């Protein structure tokens, strides 16, 4: 009985061992597409505020004289 179970275990081990060694793996590498990015930044608000501050100081100095 022990010999029968041992032979079954050996057969199953060989079967699983042989089946696992027959795998095939492929990696499909596709080219990466890079698209341009267009960014529009509106900086007029900052420039407008800076000019208001600059000329505001000059206007205040002119009014105080």
Image (cartoon, rainbow, N blue to C red):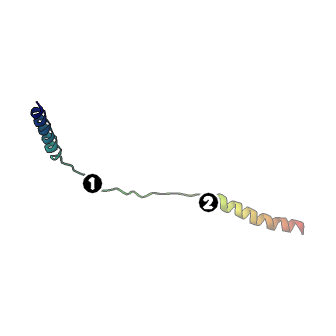
Would you call the spot at circle 2 few (<14 residues within 10 Å), some (14-19), or many (20 or more)? few
**Looking at the image, is mark 1 or mark 2 earlier in the sequence?**
1
Quadrant in which the N terminus appears:
top left
Please state if 7 lies on the left or on the right of 52 as rendered.
left
Residue 42: x %, y % from top left: 59, 57
* Residue located beneath label 1 in the image: 29
Residue at 13 percent across and 44 percent down: it is: 18
The disc at residue 64 is none
Q: In 3D space, how far apart are the residues under numbered discs 1 and 2 (Cα atoms)?
A: 42 Å
Q: Nearer the viewer, mark 1 or mark 2?
A: 1
Residue at 80 percent across and 66 percent down: it is: 57
Residue at 84 percent across and 65 percent down: it is: 60
Please state if 13 lies on the left or on the right of 45 as rendered.
left
Residue 19: x %, y % from top left: 15, 42
Residue at 16 percent across and 44 percent down: it is: 17
Placement of 2 over or under 20, stated as above or below: above
* Residue located beneath label 2 in the image: 43
Comparing 47 with 20, the one in front is: 20
Please state if 58 lies on the left or on the right of 19 as rendered.
right
Quadrant in which the C terminus appears:
bottom right
* Element type at mark 2: loop
Comparing 27 with 22, the one in front is: 22
**The quadrant where residue 34 appears:** bottom left
Residue 50: x %, y % from top left: 70, 63
Placement of 1 over or under 30, stated as above or below: above
């Amino acid at each position: 009985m022990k010999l029968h179970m041992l032979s079954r275990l050996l057969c199953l081990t060989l079967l699983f061992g042989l089946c696992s060694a027959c795998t095939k793996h492929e990696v499909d590498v596709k080219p990466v597409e890079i698209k341009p990015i267009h960014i529009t930044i509106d900086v007029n608000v900052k420039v407008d505020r800076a000019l208001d501050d600059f000329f505001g100081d000059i206007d205040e100095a002119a009014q105080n004289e």
